[in-house]
Amino acid sequence: MKKTLFIIILLGMSASVTAGEAHFCGSPEVSALASGRQDIDDSTVFTCGGGVKGTLPELAKQGWKIVQVSDQMASTSQMDPSKATVYSRLIIQKD
């Protein structure tokens, strides 16, 4: 009986633990060759998976932690580097 009760308590405790959540986010793309290209700042809006969207301050207020920031380059044409765009990529996480 004690063993069964112990197992029921353990199962109840494990069911009450919630898993964390994480998403990739991206900033708007800009031309890699654009002069005067604006870097990301507190007003840059990031669009994330799971319908999450906001600036860094807004994401922080919602409880998201920035786990990683990286810059990405995309090109629609490998033959024409003038068509390359850059954007910033975040990984956000909430416990």
Image (spheres, rainbow, N blue to C red):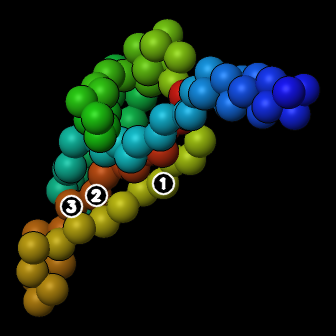
**Residue that mark 1 sits on:** 70
| Disc number placed over residue 86 in the picture, else none | 2
Give the residue at x 80% y 24%: 5
State which tag comes first along the sequence, 1 or 3: 1
Give the residue at x 15% y 86%: 78
Q: Secondary structure at mark 1?
A: strand
Judge the density around disc 2: few (<14), some (14-19), many (≥20) Cα neighbours within 10 Å.
some
Give the residue at x 42% y 56%: 71
Give the CA separation, mark 2 to mark 3: 4 Å
Residue 38: which quarter of the image?
top left
Give the CA separation, mark 1 to mark 3: 14 Å
The N terminus sits in image quarter: top right
Q: Nearer the viewer, residue 46 or 75?
A: 46
Mark nearest the camera among 2 and 1 is 1
Judge the density around disc 3: few (<14), some (14-19), many (≥20) Cα neighbours within 10 Å.
some
* Disc 3 residue type (three-letter): Thr
* Disc 2 residue type (three-letter): Val
The residue most toward the top is: 61
Q: Nearer the viewer, residue 43 or 24?
A: 24
Q: Position of residue 6 (x, y in %)?
A: 84, 28
Q: Position of residue 30 (x, y in %)?
A: 20, 50
| Disc number placed over residue 85 in the picture, else none | 3
Residue 65 is at least partly visible in this image: no
Q: Secondary structure at mark 3?
A: strand
Q: Position of residue 76 (x, y in %)?
A: 10, 73
Give the CA separation, mark 2 to mark 1: 11 Å
Residue 14 is at least partly visible in this image: yes
The residue most toward the bottom is: 79
Contact between labelled residues 3 and 1, with CB atoms less than 8 Å apart: no
